[in-house]
C-alpha cells in the first residue's frame, strides 16, 4: 500500500507528548533530585546503553562510561534551557562523553606507548567466533581518530543523516561531511585485507546493528567541504 503524504505528520502528536513528558521529567529532576534521578535513568538507560555500545562496541569500560553520562546529565541539567529537547541533549552528552574517553585513550597510546589489545566486555559476547570477529572489528575502529570514529558510528550504526550528526556533535554540516568522508576512506583502507569485514560494511550489506547505512541526501552531497585547521 502507498504511504500517505501525511504519514510524517501522524507522528507529530507522539513527538509532542514525548517532549512534554521529558520537560516534566526534567522539572522533577531539578526539584526532587533523589527521585528524579531514578526516573531519568529509567527513561534513558536503554538509549544511552545502546548508543555507547554503537560508538564503542563491546567495551570493557561500557558500564563506567554509562555512569559518567548520567552523572554529567545530573550535574548539568540546570544548563538545559529548552526542557522539551531533553532527549537530544542526553544524546549529545552521551556522544561527548564517549568522545572524551576516546581522546584520553589516544593520549595514553601516544604518550604512554600503550599497546594493549582491544578488549570487549566478557559478559556481552560468549560465542568464540563472534568474539573473534568483534575483536577484529573493534581493533580497526580503535585506529580511527576520535572525531572520525564518532561520526562514522553515528552514520553507519545509528543510521543518522549528516544533519542529525551535525546537530548531535555540534558540527557544521560541512565539517560532519568532511569527517565522515575521511572516516570512510580510512576505514575502507584498514579493512581492505579482511574479507569478512569488507562484506559487512559495504553499502549492499546491513550494518552490524542491522540498520542500513544512510545514504547522503542530495542537499548533503551539495555541501562544500570547508577547510578546518585542527588545534
Image: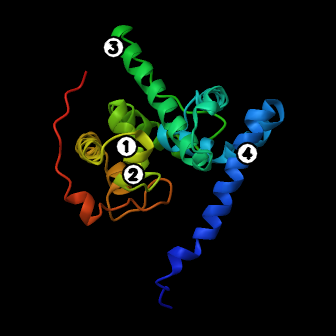
| Real-space CA distance between mark 3 and mark 4, rounded to the nearest whole angstrom | 42 Å
Q: Residue furthest top?
A: 112
**Which disc, if any, is residue 10?**
none
| Real-space CA distance between mark 2 and mark 3, rounded to the nearest whole angstrom | 27 Å
Q: Closer to the N terminus: mark 3 or mark 4?
A: 4
Of the residues tagged 2 and 3, which is closer to the observer? 2
Disc 4, SS: helix
Q: Are marks 2 and 3 in contact (CB under 8 Å)?
A: no
Q: Residue at x 44, y 30 (%)?
A: 99
Q: Which residue is mark 3?
A: 110
Q: Closer to the N terminus: mark 1 or mark 3?
A: 3
Q: Are marks 2 and 1 in contact (CB under 8 Å)?
A: yes
Quadrant where the image shows the C terminus: top left
| Real-space CA distance between mark 2 and mark 4, rounded to the nearest whole angstrom | 29 Å
Of residues 80 and 66, the one nearer the viewer is: 80
Above or below: residue 218 compared with residue 124: below
Of the residues tagged 1 and 4, which is closer to the observer? 4
Q: Closer to the N terminus: mark 2 or mark 4?
A: 4
Q: Which residue is mark 1?
A: 151
| Real-space CA distance between mark 2 and mark 1, rounded to the nearest whole angstrom | 6 Å
Place residue 20 in its image quadrant.
bottom right
Disc 2, SS: helix
Task: From the top left corner, tell me how far across and down residue 45 is, in percent.
Answer: 68, 43
Q: Which residue is mark 2?
A: 155
Amino acid at each position: 500500500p502507498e504511504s500517505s503524504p501525511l504519514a510524517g505528520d501522524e507522528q507529530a502528536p507522539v513527538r509532542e507528548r514525548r517532549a512534554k513528558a521529558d520537560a516534566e521529567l526534567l522539572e522533577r529532576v531539578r526539584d526532587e533530585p533523589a527521585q528524579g534521578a531514578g526516573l531519568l535513568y529509567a527513561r534513558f538507560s536503554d538509549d544511552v546503553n545502546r548508543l555507547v555500545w554503537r560508538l564503542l562496541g563491546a567495551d570493557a569500560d561500557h558500564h563506567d562510561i554509562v555512569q559518567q553520562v548520567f552523572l554529567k546529565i545530573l550535574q548539568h541539567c540546570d544548563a538545559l534551557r529548552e526542557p522539551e529537547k531533553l532527549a537530544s541533549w542526553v544524546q549529545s552528552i552521551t556522544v561527548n562523553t564517549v568522545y572524551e574517553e576516546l581522546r584520553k585513550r589516544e593520549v595514553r597510546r601516544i604518550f604512554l606507548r600503550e599497546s594493549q589489545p582491544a578488549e570487549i566486555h566478557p559478559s556481552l559476547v560468549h560465542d568464540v567466533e563472534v568474539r573473534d570477529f568483534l575483536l577484529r572489528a573493534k581493533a580497526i575502529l580503535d585506529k580511527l581518530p576520535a572525531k572520525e570514529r564518532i561520526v562514522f558510528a553515528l552514520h553507519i550504526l545509528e543510521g543518522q543523516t549528516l544533519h542529525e550528526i551535525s546537530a548531535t556533535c555540534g558540527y557544521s554540516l560541512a565539517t560532519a561531511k568532511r569527517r565522515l568522508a575521511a572516516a570512510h576512506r580510512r576505514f575502507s583502507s584498514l579493512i581492505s585485507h579482511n574479507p569478512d569485514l569488507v562484506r559487512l560494511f559495504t553499502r549492499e550489506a546491513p550494518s552490524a546493528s542491522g540498520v542500513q547505512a544512510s545514504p547522503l541526501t542530495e542537499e548533503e552531497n551539495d555541501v562544500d567541504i570547508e577547510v578546518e585547521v585542527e588545534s
